[in-house]
Image (cartoon, rainbow, N blue to C red):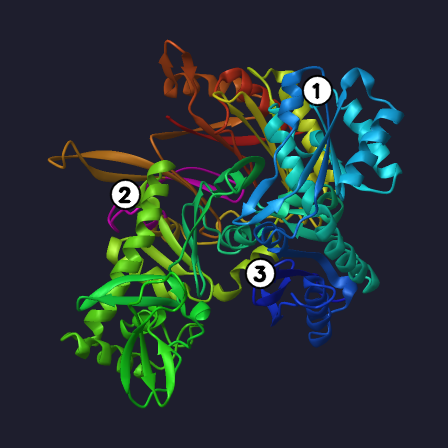
C-alpha cells in the first residue's frame, strides 16, 4: 500500500483540472488538464471520469490509496444562467390566505428571457391526506411540473405534513424536496423560493452525480465522492442529491478554499485572476466571509462566499481614445476571438486599428495587425512590458513582442510604450482597488494587516502592481494556476444549520450543536475532527451552527518551537506592519501556539502625536499567524478554573450601555485548536458554548484566552 492521496477536480468553463496531493504533507504529486466535456452525451461527468482515470493511471496510484476525492463544478450556476432547469410544482399548505399567497410564486426570471416555470396547488393543513395530496401531484404533473416541493407555514417547527407530501411524491416515482430540509428559518416565501430553485436543479445535478459516483465505486476508490459547496466546504453526494442548490456559486469558492487551506492566509484579500475576470474575496481571522446569495433579484436562504467579480484580468482588452488609455475591459480577448499580443512572436507592427469587438461594445478597443494576423492589446501585455511577470510564470512570455506592440501604440500617441502600459495598469488597479477598499471598509479590516494573495493563471498580471501602487504586502500563491483545484482537494466537509430563535438559551445552544454534529457525521466525518462554531445574530434573531471536519482525520503531535524565537519575532513584526526594531515579547505558549505582543508606535490625533499600541499575534510553530488583534489581552487558565479566571477580564474589556453588557470577542486556544467565540454577545451564551466545547477536556488541561475589546 502506497502513501495516501487526496484528489481535487475543478470543472471550469474551458478546462477540467485535477491535482493529486499527498494526504499528510499537502505536497502536489501530479496535475492534469483536459477540455471540459460540455457537449458530450454524458455532459461534464464524462470529463470528471476521464480525468480521474488519467491521474490514477499516469501516476500509478492504487485506487485504495485515495483517502479523499472531491470535485467543484459550475454546472448548477450555468444551469440557472442558461435556464436549463426543470419546471417545479409547489404543493403549498397552511391555514390562512396569507400563507397561500406566500407559497404561490410567479415564474422566476433567471436571466433575460430565461424563466423557471412554476405551478402551484394548495391544500389546507387540516385536509392533508393521501387523496388530496395525490390529486395535487397529478394536477401539477398535468400542467408540466417535472419535480415537486412541499411547503407549509411553520414547517420548521413541525414538518410532519411536508414529510407526508414528500413521501407521496417519492411513492409515485417523482423527484421532490421539502422546505424544512433546505432551511430552518422562518420566512415562508423565501424558504419556498429557495426550495423551488433547489428542486429545479435536482434532475440535472443527479445525472452528473450518479454517473460520477458510479465510476468512483467501480474504480474501487474507498473514499466517498464529495462535492464543493458555495460556502467553501464540501458535502457528500447523498447530501447534494437533496440540496443541489448548495453547489451554486461553488466555482468561486474553490479558489478561496485553496487560499485558506494551502496558502494559510489568515487576514488578507485573495484575488483569483483569470483571462476574463478577477474574483475578489476577503479572509478575516482565517475565515471566509459569507453572505446570502441571490438568483436574479430574488433573495435566497443560501449562504455563499462574499466574492466580488470584476471584468478586469489578463486578457482584458485596452480602450484608447483622445491619445490615452481610457479603460481596461470588460471585453476580453477570448470573447473577441483575438490572440494576445503578449504571447505572439511579432516581427513588426503593420497597423494599429480600433474596433468594436462585440455588439454593444465601444468602438475604441485597440488591436494591431502583424503579418496578416490581428492581435489584441491586453493587460497581460502591459504587465509584461512593465516587468511584473517573472520568467517561468504562467502568464510570462519573452517581453520583446509585448514591448514591440506597446511601443508602436505609444508612438501613435506621442508617448513611450511603457507610459501607455502604465496608464492601462493604473486604470486596472484603480478599478480593482475600488472594490477592495469597499470590502475593507464594510468588514472593518485594518489595512496594516492586509496581504494581497494572487491566484489563477493571471495572478502576476495585477497582484504586484496593486501592492506597489497602494503600498500593500503582496505575494503570488504557490501553484497559482491550480489554486482552485487544490482548494477542492483540501476542502473540509462542512454543514450549517440556521434557526429563528429569539434570545437563544443554553438548551437552544446544546440542541443546535447536537443536531449539526449528527448532520455532519452522516458524511462519514471522523467525530474527533469535528469543530463547531455557534453564532447569534441579535438583529435578525438567527442562531447559526457551522460544523467542519474531515473524513480522514490524523492527529498530529506538534513540537513547541519549530522555528527560532528570532524568526518568530520577525514574522510577528512583519504581520502587523511594524519596523524591524519594534519590541516583541511572548505572553504565553501552548502546544503549537505562541501568543506574541508587538509593542508598536502609531500616529494619533491628526498625526501630530504618537501613542504606543500593543498588537497581539497568535502564531503557530511553523510561523503561520492565525490572529492579529489590537486592544487585546491574554489570560492563562485551565479547564477547571476557566469560569473563575475569565470573568474579571471579560468585565474589564466589556462595553456597557443602556442595552446592557457587550462582551469582548473571545478566542480560546488548546494545544492544537483555536476556538472562535466572536459570534456570541453575552456571558451566558459564552459560558454555555464553552462548556459544550470543553466538556470532554481534562480539568487540569491548560487553555489560553485571547480577548479583544469591541
In front: mark 2 or mark 1? Answer: 1
Which residue is at 70% across, 36% downward? Answer: 119
* Cα–Cα gap, marks 3 and 2: 41 Å
Q: Residue at x 86, y 31 (%)?
A: 134
Residue mark closest to the camera, 3 vs 2: 3
Q: Position of residue 263 (x, y in %)?
A: 48, 55
Q: Residue most toward the front?
A: 143
> Does residue 184 appear in this view?
no
- Between disc 1 and disc 3, whose residue precedes? 1
Viewer-proximal residue, 344 or 322? 322
Residue drawn at x 75%, y 38% is 148
Residue 620 percent across, percent down from the top left: 48, 46
* Residue 275 is inside the magenta segment: no
**Pointer 1: what residue?**
157
Q: Which residue lies at the image location 53% right of the left edge and 64% below the top edge?
A: 482
Q: Is residue 674 above or below residue 188?
A: below
Give left or right: position of 557 versus 305: right
**Residue 303 disc label:** none
Q: CA distance from mark 1 to mark 3?
A: 40 Å
Is label 1 or label 3 in front? 1
Q: Is residue 224 left or right of residue 565?
A: right
Residue contact at pointers 1 and 3, CB within 8 angstroms: no
Residue 11 percent across, percent down from the top left: 61, 61
The secondary structure type at the circle numbered 2 is loop
Cβ atoms at labels 3 and 2 below 8 Å apart: no
Residue designated by label 3 = 485
Range of residues picked out in magenta: 572-596
Kindly state the secondary structure of the residue where label 3 is placed. helix
Q: Where residue 30 sits: x, y (%)?
A: 62, 70
Label 3: few (<14), some (14–19) or many (≥20) C-alpha neighbours in 10 Å: many
In the rendered structure, find residue 583 and report the number of the disc placed on it.
Answer: 2
Residue 160 appears in the picture as rendered: yes
Amino acid at each position: 500500500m502506497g502513501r495516501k492521496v487526496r484528489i481535487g477536480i475543478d470543472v471550469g468553463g474551458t478546462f477540467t483540472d485535477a491535482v493529486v496531493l499527498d494526504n499528510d504533507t499537502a505536497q502536489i504529486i501530479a496535475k492534469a488538464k483536459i477540455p471540459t466535456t460540455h457537449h458530450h452525451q454524458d455532459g461534464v461527468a464524462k470529463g470528471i471520469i476521464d480525468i480521474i482515470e488519467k491521474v490514477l493511471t499516469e501516476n500509478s496510484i492504487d485506487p485504495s490509496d485515495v483517502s479523499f476525492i472531491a470535485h467543484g463544478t459550475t454546472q448548477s450556476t450555468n444551469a440557472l444562467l442558461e435556464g436549463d432547469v426543470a419546471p417545479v410544482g409547489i404543493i403549498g399548505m397552511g391555514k390562512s390566505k396569507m400563507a397561500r399567497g406566500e407559497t404561490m410564486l410567479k415564474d422566476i426570471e433567471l436571466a433575460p428571457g430565461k424563466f423557471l416555470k412554476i405551478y402551484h396547488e394548495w391544500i389546507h393543513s387540516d385536509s392533508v391526506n393521501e387523496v388530496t395530496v395525490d390529486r395535487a401531484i397529478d394536477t401539477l404533473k398535468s400542467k408540466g411540473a417535472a419535480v415537486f416541493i412541499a411547503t407549509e407555514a411553520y414547517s420548521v417547527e413541525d414538518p410532519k405534513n411536508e414529510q407526508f407530501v414528500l413521501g407521496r411524491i417519492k411513492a409515485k416515482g417523482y423527484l421532490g424536496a421539502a422546505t424544512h430540509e433546505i432551511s430552518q428559518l422562518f420566512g415562508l416565501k423565501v424558504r419556498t423560493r429557495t426550495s423551488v430553485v433547489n428542486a429545479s436543479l435536482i434532475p440535472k445535478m443527479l445525472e452528473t452525480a450518479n454517473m460520477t459516483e458510479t465510476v468512483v465505486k467501480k474504480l474501487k476508490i474507498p473514499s466517498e465522492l464529495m462535492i464543493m459547496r458555495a460556502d467553501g466546504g464540501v458535502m457528500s453526494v447523498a447530501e447534494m442529491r437533496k440540496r443541489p442548490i448548495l453547489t451554486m456559486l461553488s466555482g468561486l469558492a474553490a479558489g478561496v478554499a485553496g487560499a485558506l487551506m494551502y496558502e494559510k492566509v489568515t487576514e488578507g484579500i485573495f484575488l483569483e485572476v483569470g483571462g476574463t475576470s478577477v474574483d475578489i474575496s476577503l479572509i478575516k481571522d482565517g475565515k471566509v466571509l459569507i453572505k446570502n446569495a441571490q438568483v436574479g433579484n430574488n433573495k435566497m436562504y443560501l449562504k455563499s462566499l462574499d466574492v466580488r467579480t470584476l471584468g478586469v484580468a489578463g486578457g482584458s482588452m485596452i480602450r484608447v481614445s483622445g491619445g490615452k488609455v481610457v479603460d481596461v475591459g470588460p471585453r476580453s480577448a477570448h470573447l473577441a476571438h483575438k490572440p494576445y499580443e503578449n504571447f505572439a512572436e511579432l516581427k513588426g507592427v503593420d497597423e494599429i486599428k480600433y474596433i468594436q469587438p462585440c455588439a454593444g461594445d465601444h468602438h475604441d478597443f485597440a488591436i494591431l495587425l502583424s503579418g496578416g494576423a490581428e492581435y489584441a492589446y491586453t493587460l497581460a501585455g502591459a504587465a509584461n512590458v512593465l516587468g511584473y511577470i517573472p520568467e517561468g510564470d504562467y502568464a510570462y512570455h519573452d517581453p520583446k513582442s509585448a514591448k514591440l506592440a506597446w511601443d508602436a501604440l505609444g508612438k501613435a500617441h506621442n508617448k513611450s510604450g511603457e507610459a501607455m502600459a502604465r496608464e492601462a495598469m493604473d486604470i486596472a488597479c484603480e478599478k480593482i482597488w475600488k472594490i477592495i477598499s469597499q470590502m475593507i471598509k464594510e468588514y472593518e479590516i485594518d489595512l496594516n494587516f492586509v496581504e494581497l494573495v494572487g491566484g489563477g493563471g493571471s495572478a502576476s498580471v495585477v497582484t504586484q502592481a496593486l501592492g506597489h501602487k497602494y503600498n500593500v504586502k503582496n505575494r503570488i500563491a504557490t501553484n497559482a494556476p491550480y489554486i482552485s483545484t487544490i482548494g477542492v482537494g483540501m476542502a473540509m466537509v462542512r454543514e450549517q444549520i440556521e434557526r429563528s430563535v429569539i434570545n437563544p438559551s443554553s438548551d437552544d445552544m446544546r440542541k443546535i450543536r447536537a443536531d449539526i454534529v449528527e448532520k455532519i457525521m452522516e458524511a462519514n466525518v471522523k467525530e474527533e475532527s469535528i469543530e463547531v462554531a455557534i453564532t447569534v445574530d441579535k438583529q435578525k434573531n438567527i442562531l447559526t451552527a457551522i460544523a467542519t471536519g474531515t473524513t480522514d482525520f490524523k492527529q498530529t503531535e506538534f513540537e513547541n518551537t519549530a522555528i527560532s524565537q528570532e524568526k518568530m519575532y520577525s514574522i510577528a513584526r512583519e504581520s502587523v506592519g511594524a519596523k524591524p526594531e519594534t519590541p516583541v515579547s511572548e505572553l504565553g505558549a501552548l502546544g503549537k501556539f505562541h501568543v506574541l505582543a508587538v509593542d508598536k508606535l502609531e500616529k494619533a490625533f491628526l498625526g501630530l502625536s504618537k501613542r504606543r499600541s500593543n498588537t497581539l499575534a497568535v502564531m503557530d510553530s511553523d510561523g503561520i499567524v492565525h490572529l492579529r488583534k489590537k486592544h487585546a489581552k491574554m489570560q492563562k487558565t485551565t479547564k477547571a478554573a476557566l469560569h473563575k479566571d475569565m470573568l474579571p477580564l471579560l468585565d474589564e474589556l466589556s462595553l456597557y450601555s443602556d442595552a446592557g453588557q457587550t462582551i469582548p470577542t473571545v478566542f480560546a486556544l488548546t494545544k492544537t485548536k483555536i476556538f472562535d467565540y466572536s459570534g456570541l454577545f453575552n456571558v451566558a451564551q459564552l459560558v454555555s458554548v464553552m462548556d459544550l466545547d470543553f466538556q470532554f477536556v481534562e480539568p487540569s488541561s491548560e487553555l489560553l484566552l485571547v480577548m479583544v475589546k469591541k
